[in-house]
Every structure is written in structure tokens, then in C-alpha cells.
Image: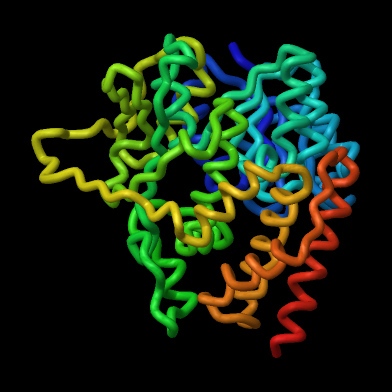
Amino acid sequence: MKNIVILGSTGTIGQNTLEVIRKGRDRFNVIGLACRENKDLLARQIREFRPEYVYFEKVDTVFERRFPRVKILCGDKGLEKIASLKKADIIICAIPGISTLKAVCSAIRSKKVIGLATKEILVVAGHIINRLSRKYGACILPVDSEHNAVFQALEGIKKEDVKKIYLTASGGPFGGRPAGKNATLKDVLKHPVWKMGKKITVDSATMMNKAFEIIEAHYLFGLPAEKIGVLIHPEAFIHGMVELNDGTIKGVFSSPDMKFPINFVLDYPRRKETPWRPIDFSSMKKLTFSSADRNSAWFSLAAEAIEKNGSLPVVLNAANEEAVNLFLQGKIKFNGIIDIVQKAVRSHRIKKHVSLEDIFEIDRRAKNKVRELVRTKL
């Protein structure tokens, strides 16, 4: 029986994780749930899964009185504590943004298995996370379908035999192409394959989500940008591929359902039969691929962040996050997101050596810079 803590239990990944656990009660036990604000859903999850510990951001004595047998944790220290519980075997990290960065570091120091769905953690602090993981012997398993697929395809393969890896992308609502000048919020949030939160759906439309996945892959697999390719694959049945020096290509196929990679992480290193809908090849009419433009703004930003490193990935992530927030608030147009991100990156003076505390300050300044750029433009 594996004891599971879910950081972000009310989000899409969290809910899918609980569905996997629901189907595997004989193998999994929830001991901790954490969320930001959705306490109605959190309350239902507590009643069903009966965790010992629950985290939310701010103290709420009324909520606490509803669950007297649950140990309620709040604030930064509370998040770090729930991520490093002695009883926990696996920590699923699925709260968007960098708010869980210190909690993930605590989980690593506690030698936990970490199912990482929050790509921002490696984007802004990949060098720190990798150093800590080596020091404490923690295991980080990618939950993102693309990285999870590449992880599976790389098993048993020597690094020197890898010519290139490929992350696939559905292309979002605009098929990986630039959107029209009058693209609305409704257009942007109409993802053809995946059901996700608003922020990541916007990132999928701008392709910045794939830019961050390239950076994440760099840290997960120790590969330079030139060995990481992106293929637009609208059907979303192949999630990642590894090209070997002998010309052989290994790929991982599954229906576009996050429960597959989540199930892999929870059961790792074993594999168990699952009830999720498999691919029916007899009804599959076609599989299409096209190469992403490496000269596009989002790809160039990812490659630059990998090459220059230091504080640049932190600024890239923060600037994009703030620009997306401003778009969701109706303060800038969709086509202005990448433009503002590029300006914020160009105006930044790179700091080569970045500590954990530096990251939060750089993040704050970059967001302020984006707001300043928008005010100046307006």
C-alpha cells in the first residue's frame, strides 16, 4: 500500500490522480491533500478519502471545525510539512506556478518519490532540483504526458545512444499556427483535445507551454536544446518519442487521458492493469505530424533560456504568467502575450548564479516589469 500526498488535489491533475486512486484502493491510500481555494471540492474529497492532513493557503477556523479529526496545515511551512510527511511514499506536485518550490525541495530532502506535474519547478530551478535530487537520492517522475512518454521510452537506453527526443503537441486551438488578430478568450480556451485550467490552455494556444516543456526536458533528461524536437500531432495519441543513433525510434502511445501517465507514476516501477480506454487501432483513420518551427518566438525563447540559464528562465516564466493573467483579465490582446514576454526578457540583465530565495525576488520583479510595459503601451 502506497501513501499518497497530492499538492493541488482540486485541479485537473489532482482530480485525475484521485480517480486513479479510486480505482486502486487496494494499492493506494491518500494521507494528504492540498489546494489553494476550492474548499467545496476539497471538503468532498476529505469525506471520501479521509486524509490525515489537509493544507490550504489561509487559516479558516470555520472549515477546520467541520473536520476535527484532520490535521489542518496553512502557510508556506504547512505546505513544506505536508510535502515531507514521514508516512508519505509519493508526493504528486500539481499546483501551478512556483509556490510549491520550497515544498518540492523539502520532499526531495525527505527522499520522497515526486510525481512532478508542475513544470514551472524545473523551468525556474532545474539546476537546484537536480543538485538536491543527486544529493538526497530522491526520485522525480514526470507526470506531463510528453515527458512521461519520453521517460518510458528512455528506460534501458544509454544516454550516448540517444540522437534526439521529440515532444508532441496537439497544437492547441490554432493548430500550432499564429492566431488571428481578433482571437477572443473563448477561441483561445477552446482546446481540441485536453481539458485543462485556463492558464495552461492559454499557454497551449501561444505554444509557450511547449517552450516550458523543452526547458523541463532539458533538466529531466540532461539534453541540450538541439536534441529536443517538437512535433505537431493533432490526434495526440503519440505523446513522446526517442530517436536512437541507429535510426530506430521508440514512441509511447495512449489515448489522450492524463490517467495513463498518472497511473504509471503511482505504480512505478511496476505496471498494473487499468480500466482506462486503450487505443483502438482498427478505428484510427490517420496519424499526422508536422515539425514545429524552431525559429518561432516561443521555441527561440526556450533555446535561449537553456543556453544562457541563470535568472533568464525565471524571468521567462514570470513574464509569461503575468502576461497571461493580463490577457485573462481583458487588459491585453492575445497576440500581445508573446510580444510582452519577449520585451521583458530582452530588458533583463541576467544573473548567472541564482539561489532559491533569488528566484522569488526575480519572479516578483519580472511581473512588475510586465505590468510596467503594459502601462507604458497603453
Residue 192: image location, x then y, percent: 34, 59
Picture quadrant of residue 308: top right
Residue 175: image location, x then y, percent: 33, 61
Residue furthest out toward the bottom: 378
Residue at 28 percent across and 34 percent down: it is: 277
Instruction: Give the side of residue 228 with respect to residue 341, left or right.
Output: left
Nearest the eye: 307 or 117: 307
Residue at 73 percent across and 20 percent down: it is: 133
Nearest the eye: 152 or 6: 152
Residue 371: image location, x then y, percent: 77, 75
| Colouring scheme applied when the structure was drawn | rainbow
Nearest the eye: 68 or 332: 332
Name the quarter where the C terminus is drawn.
Answer: bottom right
Residue at 56 percent across and 19 percent down: it is: 28
Picture quadrant of residue 109: top right
Instruction: Give the side of residue 15 with respect to residue 98, left or right.
Output: left
Residue at 41 percent across and 31 percent down: it is: 165
Q: Can you see residue 331?
A: yes
Task: Please say if 56 is above or below 144.
Answer: below
Residue 232: image location, x then y, percent: 33, 50
Task: Please say if 10 is above or below 364.
Answer: above
Number of marks in the rendered image? 0
Task: Please say if 87 is above or below 374.
Answer: above
Q: Can you see residue 60?
A: no
Name the quarter where the N terminus is drawn.
Answer: top right
Instruction: Give the side of residue 180 with respect to residue 75, left or right.
Output: left
